[in-house]
Image (cartoon, rainbow, N blue to C red):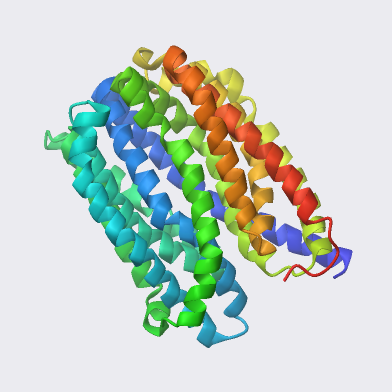
C-alpha cells in the first residue's frame, strides 16, 4: 500500500472515529445530565446507592456484554467478506455463548442481592439497587450485541445513533417522574430498567437479518470460545477493578463517600469515552491487517492522534473545582480532587489502551488478560493502603496506580509482539 493510500485510509479512520465519538459524546453528555439531576435531587448518600446500582450493572454487564464484543467484531468483520456461512455461525455462536453465561449469572445475582445488601454492604436499599443492577445488565447485553454487529459492519453512523438511546429514553422519563412526584430512588431504578429494555429492543430489530441467518456450529463455537474466553476475562477483570470502587467505598465509608467519588467519576466519563470511541473504530480495522509492519505503521500514525486529544482534554484539570461547584453544588466540593486524580488516569489510558487492541489483531488475546490481571492486583494492593484512610480521594488515587501499571505493560507487550516480522494471522 502506498503512502498516499495510507494517508487516505488514516483520514477515513479519523472521520469514523469522529462519527463514533459523536454518539459516544452524546451518551456521555446525557449521562452527565442525568447524573447532575439525580445527584442534586437525591443528595450524596442516596446518590451513592444509585451509583451502587450503576456499578453493579457495569460489573455484570462486563461478564456477558462488552466482554464478548471483541470476539464477535474480530471474526464477523473477517468472515463477512469471505464466507457468509461462517459469518452466520459467528452470530449464532456469539448468542449461544452470551446466554450460556448471562442466564445463570443473572439468576445468581438476583438471588444473592438481598444477602449482599444486608450482610456485606450494610446499607439500606443496597440489596434493591444490586438486584436492579443485575437485571439492567442483562438487558444491556442485548444492546451491545447489536452494537457489535453494527461495528463489525462498519456502520458507525447507525451505531452512533443507537449507542446513547437508553440515556435518551431515561432523560425523557425524568420529567415525567418529577411531575408525577415519583423522582425517588426506586422509581428511578425502574426507569433505568425500562430505558435499557427499549434500547435492547431497537438494537435487536436493526440486526434482525443477521439473527434470522444465525446458526450454531460446534467447530465455530469452540474457536469463538477459545478467543472470547481471553477477551471476556480481560474485560471482566478490568471492569471489576473499575467498578468495585463504589461498593468498596460504600462498605468502608458509607454511601455518602461513594456518592462523592461517583460524582467525580461521572465528570471524567467524557474523557474515558474518547478512548472507547477510538477503540471501537480501530478493532475492525486492525482485524483486517495481516502483517506486523502494517500494524506498526498504523499505530505510529494513530499515537499522534491520541496525544493530541489528551492535550486538548488536559485543561479540565485546572477547571475541575469550578466545574464541580457549578454542576453539583457545594455538597459535592470534595469531588473536585477526585476529578483531578481520575483525569490523570483517564489521560494515561487514552494514550495507551487503544494500543492494546493489537493483542486481538494478532490473535494474542491472552496478553490482555495478563495486563488486566496485573493492573487489578495493583488496584487491590493500592486500595488496601489508600481507601481506608483517604476515602474518595484514596479511591481515585488507587485508580491512577492501576492505570499507570496497565499503561506500562501495554506499551512493553505491544512493542514485543510487533517486533516480529512474519504475518500475524
Q: Residue at x 22, y 26 (%)?
A: 123
Q: At which x and y percent is residue 348?
A: 65, 34
On screen, residue 227 versus residue 300, left or right, reads left
Pick whichever, 260 or 332, lies toward us: 260
Q: At which x and y percent is residue 117?
A: 22, 33
On screen, residue 28 versus residue 373, left or right, reads left
Q: Residue at x 35, y 33 (%)?
A: 35
Report if residue 1 is visible in the image: yes
Using the rendered view, name the quadrant where residue 335 is placed. Answer: top left
Q: At which x and y percent is residue 109?
A: 26, 48
Q: Residue at x 68, y 59 (%)?
A: 13
Q: At which x and y percent is residue 351?
A: 68, 40
Name the image quarter holding the N terminus: bottom right
Give the total number of marks visible in the rendering.
0
On screen, residue 123 versus residue 254, left or right, reads left
Residue 211 versus residue 231 in the image, above or below: below
Report if residue 172 is visible in the image: no
Q: Residue at x 17, y 37 (%)?
A: 186
Name the image quarter holding the C terminus: bottom right
Amino acid at each position: 500500500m502506498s503512502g498516499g493510500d495510507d494517508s487516505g485510509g488514516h483520514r477515513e479512520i479519523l472521520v469514523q472515529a469522529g462519527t463514533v465519538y459523536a454518539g459516544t459524546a452524546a451518551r456521555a453528555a446525557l449521562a452527565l445530565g442525568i447524573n447532575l439531576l439525580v445527584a442534586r435531587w437525591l443528595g450524596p448518600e442516596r446518590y451513592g446507592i444509585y451509583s451502587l446500582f450503576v456499578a453493579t450493572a457495569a460489573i455484570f454487564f462486563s461478564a456477558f456484554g462488552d466482554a464478548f464484543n471483541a470476539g464477535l467484531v474480530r471474526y464477523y468483520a473477517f468472515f463477512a467478506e469471505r464466507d457468509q456461512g461462517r459469518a452466520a455461525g459467528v452470530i449464532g455462536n456469539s448468542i449461544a455463548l452470551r446466554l450460556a453465561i448471562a442466564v445463570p449469572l443473572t439468576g445468581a445475582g438476583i438471588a444473592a442481592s438481598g444477602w449482599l445488601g444486608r450482610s456485606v454492604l450494610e446499607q439500606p436499599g443496597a440489596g434493591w439497587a444490586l438486584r436492579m443492577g443485575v437485571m439492567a445488565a442483562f438487558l444491556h447485553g442485548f444492546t451491545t450485541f447489536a452494537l457489535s454487529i453494527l461495528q463489525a459492519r462498519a456502520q458507525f453512523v447507525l451505531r452512533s445513533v443507537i449507542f446513547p438511546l437508553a440515556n435518551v429514553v431515561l432523560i425523557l422519563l425524568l420529567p415525567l417522574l418529577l411531575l408525577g412526584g415519583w423522582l425517588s430512588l426506586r422509581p428511578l431504578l425502574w426507569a433505568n430498567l425500562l430505558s435499557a429494555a427499549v434500547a435492547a429492543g431497537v438494537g435487536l430489530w436493526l440486526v434482525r437479518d443477521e439473527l434470522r441467518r444465525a446458526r450454531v456450529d460446534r467447530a465455530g463455537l469452540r474457536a469463538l470460545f477459545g478467543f472470547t474466553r481471553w477477551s471476556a476475562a480481560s474485560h471482566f477483570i478490568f471492569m471489576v477493578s473499575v467498578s468495585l470502587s463504589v461498593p468498596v467505598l460504600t462498605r468502608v465509608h458509607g454511601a455518602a463517600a461513594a456518592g462523592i467519588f461517583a460524582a467525580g467519576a461521572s465528570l471524567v466519563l467524557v474523557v474515558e469515552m474518547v478512548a472507547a470511541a477510538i477503540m471501537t473504530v480501530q478493532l475492525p480495522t486492525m482485524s483486517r491487517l495481516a502483517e506486523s509492519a502494517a500494524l506498526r505503521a498504523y499505530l505510529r500514525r494513530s499515537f499522534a492522534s491520541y496525544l493530541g486529544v489528551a492535550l486538548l482534554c488536559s485543561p479540565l484539570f485546572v477547571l475541575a473545582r469550578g466545574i464541580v461547584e457549578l454542576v453539583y453544588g457545594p455538597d459535592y466540593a470534595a469531588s473536585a480532587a477526585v476529578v483531578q486524580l481520575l483525569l490523570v488516569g483517564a489521560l494515561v489510558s487514552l494514550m495507551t489502551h487503544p494500543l492494546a487492541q493489537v493483542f486481538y489483531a494478532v490473535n494474542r488475546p491472552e496478553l490482555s488478560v495478563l495486563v488486566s490481571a496485573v493492573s487489578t492486583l495493583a488496584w487491590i494492593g493500592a486500595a488496601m493502603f489508600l481507601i481506608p484512610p483517604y476515602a474518595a480521594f484514596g479511591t481515585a488515587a488507587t485508580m491512577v496506580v492501576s492505570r499507570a501499571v496497565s499503561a506500562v505493560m501495554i506499551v512493553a507487550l505491544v512493542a514485543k509482539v510487533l517486533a516480529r516480522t512474519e504475518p500475524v494471522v
